[in-house]
Image: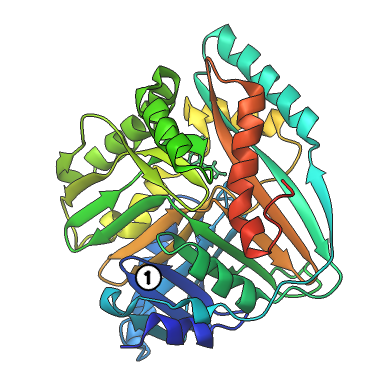
Amino acid sequence: MYRAEELLGAYLPGSFYYSSARGSLLADGVHASVGGQAGARAQAAAEAMDAAAAAGVSDPVVVGAIGFRPDDEASLVVPAVVRRAAASNNRVSDRAAVGSPPGRWSVTPRPEPDVYVETVHRALARIAEGELRKVVLARGLELTADAPISVPSLLSRLVVLNPDAHVFAVDVTTSEDPAPRSLIGASPELLVARRGDTVVANPLAGSLPRVADEAENRRRIEALRTSAKDRAEHAYVADQVAGVLSRFCTELTVPDGPDVIGTATMWHLSTRITGRIANPTDPAFSSLALAEALHPTPAVCGTPTDLARDVIKELESQNRGYYAGLVGWTDHHGDGEWVVTIRSAEVCDRTMWLSAGAGIVEGSDPTAELTETSAKLRTLLRALGLEDIA
Ligand SMILES: C=C(O[C@@H]1C=C(C(=O)O)C=C[C@H]1O)C(=O)O
């Protein structure tokens, strides 16, 4: 067993890094790539791990990321070497943050903020028609530096600045990329974790930006807790996650109402759902199978799911890529952990693409949704020392 700080220090672009309160994992090299169609990747992952075990890989795992549209983007591998740090060794000191970000950036919003506000108005008009109840609309920032971006130093700053997050870096290079491409982020949202027959999911939705003034933060926490609009926006996600997990579980515990949790930049309504898996040794009940069944939750897509996906395609100008997908790992017992790919960016050479979205429901205020996406973009911008530009 290693210390989390050692693993962070050993990260190189091309590695897979993942850390959360439950421990850290650093994976290097590719023993085998995992293919498979969307929805059938858990089976492909189980077969790849069986083959790896037969070839002498001890305790094989599958690590990687799947995009918002699982048919379009996926990067899953059985790594050659895996190093882990237990939760008890997971503390990382501030000194672990290394390097400094490039000094000069050019910033292009995609789309422009006023176009995003207009798009939210259009989504509200669709919601008023009756069938669509919630849709999550995202916007992006394209940042270009005057020098290549160091992913290891960016990752180390994300870890230090977001001690409660699930922090990740995944190699997502394709043959079309001129240089290695990495997906990095500090997600607050656990899609699903499974250990033995115990499963946990922690959907978030309904948000307010965090501010410096503590009295104002207390007011915001109370406003969020009592907001009918935010509770409705949250319930779409919590209900769907509970509904999907109930198909896999013999017992499921769903709290009566949400709590409020804080990240470094946001307050969110949060529901921690726990359950007992019906058939833990069956690959169809693995953590990746659960994650595939849950994705996309209404935290990143909407309600009803298929209609929301169509509205996103129609209204968003950018392809989401890996944003709003899932990142994590699964082992050959089916245990593992997957998070929702938010507070994230794709990085290639001198350019970074940041994305953030907000859930739109009846009663949403388009300008407040723009402000919410700016606050969400700040997770990555703080790690770049650019906190105030979004
Ligand atoms: C879509 C994002 O975040 C999601 C949307 C939320 C909301 O609309 O309130 C809150 C947390 C996340 O589930 C994002 O950060 O990009």
> x, y (%) of residue 289?
35, 54
Q: Is ligand 1 closer than 8 angstroms to the Cβ of mark 1? A: no
Whether residue 217 is visible: yes
Q: What element carries label 1?
A: helix
Q: Could you tell me residue 134's position as x and y percent?
A: 51, 24
Q: Residue furthest top?
A: 129
Residue 69: percent from left, percent from top: 58, 46
Q: Which of 43 and 312 is in front in this view?
A: 312
Q: 10 Å neighbourhood of mark 1: few (<14), some, or many (≥20)? A: some
Point out the residue furthest to the bottom here. 56
The residue shown at (79%, 75%) is 148
**Which one is nearer the viewer's eye here, 162 or 138?**
162
Give above or below for 193 relative to 374: below
Is residue 35 visible in the rendered image? The answer is no
Look at 18% across and 56% down and name the residue there: 198
**Residue 76 drawn above or below residue 8:** above
Nearer to us in this view, 194 or 70: 194
Q: In this view, does 141 lie above or below 286?
A: above
Query: How many labels, in total?
Result: 1
6 up-or-down from 161: above or below: below
- Is residue 104 left or right of 12 when viewed as pictured? right
Which residue shows up at 37% across the image and 44% down it? 261
Position of the C terminus by quadrant: top right
Badge 1 is on which residue? Answer: 47
In the image, what residue occupies the spot 50% across and 42% down?
Answer: 213
Quarter holding residue 11: bottom right
Q: What residue type is labelled 1?
A: Glu
Q: In this view, does 16 lie to the left or right of 176?
A: left
